[in-house]
Amino acid sequence: MVLLIVAGLYMFTQEIDENVPNSLTDVIEGEEVDIVIDYPVPESEVDLPIQIRGKARGNWFFEGDFPIEVEDQVGQTVATGIATADGDWMTDDFVPFQAELKFVPPVEATKLKIIFKKDNPSGDSSMDKSYSFFVNLGVMQRTVKANVFFPKIYSTNCTEVFPFERQIQLSQMMEEATLDQLLAGPTKNELDQGYTTMINDGVKLNSLAIDNGVARVDFDHQLNYQVAGSCRIQGIYAEIEQTLKQFTTINSVVISINGQTEGILEP
């Protein structure tokens, strides 16, 4: 008899645990749940960009969406996003939603706090509601994607270049690290596809400074070594400029060689 009672109690406990939703409110008798997050779950490891799926009651939405914020482990906001309803939100029932959070986390970030906020256009703070939990940023996610740009072999368009994705470590200066990837040249697979580079092998980046949208990038003498022909020079400029201009911090590029901007890269 004792064994039966214990077993029954264990089964009852297990049933409750398995049905606890990842939601704004604990499962307390008589208390309503307002939001349920299907993915990610608290303390799980996430990839970037963070894909979010869940459901919330219609009164959490305004014009079909509600805001999401992301904080690092010290409480600094590092990203914002919008959860968008996947259906009619003018209801008191649950409405499915999804969101995608694209951002570059701080280098030191290992945990991120995702905050879901009820949209409250009234401005009445008594109507505010939010729900939050932490997720873990995996080591493999301490990188971010950027593009380098290379031309096609034998192209007659001297300034046409094409993007190729690279993974950049977040511990590095993004723009500088991407330039280093450009100087490393195309991969074997990219070469096999018919792409090339107009930049000499062995070029070293001396420095990169960005101020008021202007990137001043200085290379060693190898960039200029035995370079001839206006088409090749246009290609060199195109590779460097397009690689740098993908970043919102850069609007224009000034190239120099060992500090000199005159008399370089001439046909």
Image: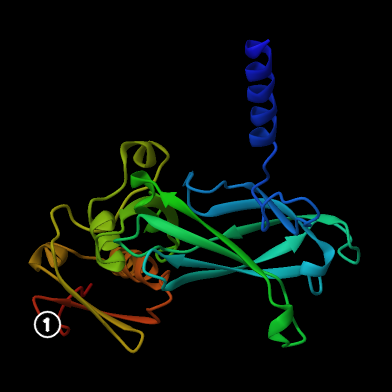
Instruction: Please say if 142 is above or below 123.
Output: above
Which of 118 and 236 lies nearest the eye of the viewer? 118
Q: Residues within 10 Å of mark 1 (few under 14, many from 20)?
A: few
Q: Residue at horizontal 72%, vertical 75%?
A: 119
Taking the image as shown, residue 225 lies to the left or right of residue 79, namely left
Give the position of the C terminus as an image quadrant.
Answer: bottom left
- Mark 1: amino acid: Gln
For disc 1, the marked residue is 260
Q: How many marks?
A: 1
Task: Mark yes or no: residue 155 visible.
Answer: no
Quarter of the figure with residue 209:
bottom left
Q: Residue at horizontal 47%, vertical 64%?
A: 103
The percent position of residue 198, horizontal first and vertical second, equals 28, 57
Taking the image as shown, residue 243 lies to the left or right of residue 115, namely left
The percent position of residue 157, horizontal first and vertical second, equals 45, 62
Colouring rule applied to residues: rainbow
Task: Mark yes or no: residue 188 visible.
Answer: yes
Instruction: Please say if 94 is above or below 44.
Output: below
Q: Residue at horizontal 49%, vertical 44%?
A: 44
Q: Residue at horizontal 83%, vertical 55%?
A: 94
Which of 264 and 190 lies nearest the eye of the viewer? 190
Instruction: Please say if 64 is above or below 198.
Output: below
The percent position of residue 110, horizontal first and vertical second, equals 35, 55
Per the image, label 1 sits on a secondary structure element best described as loop
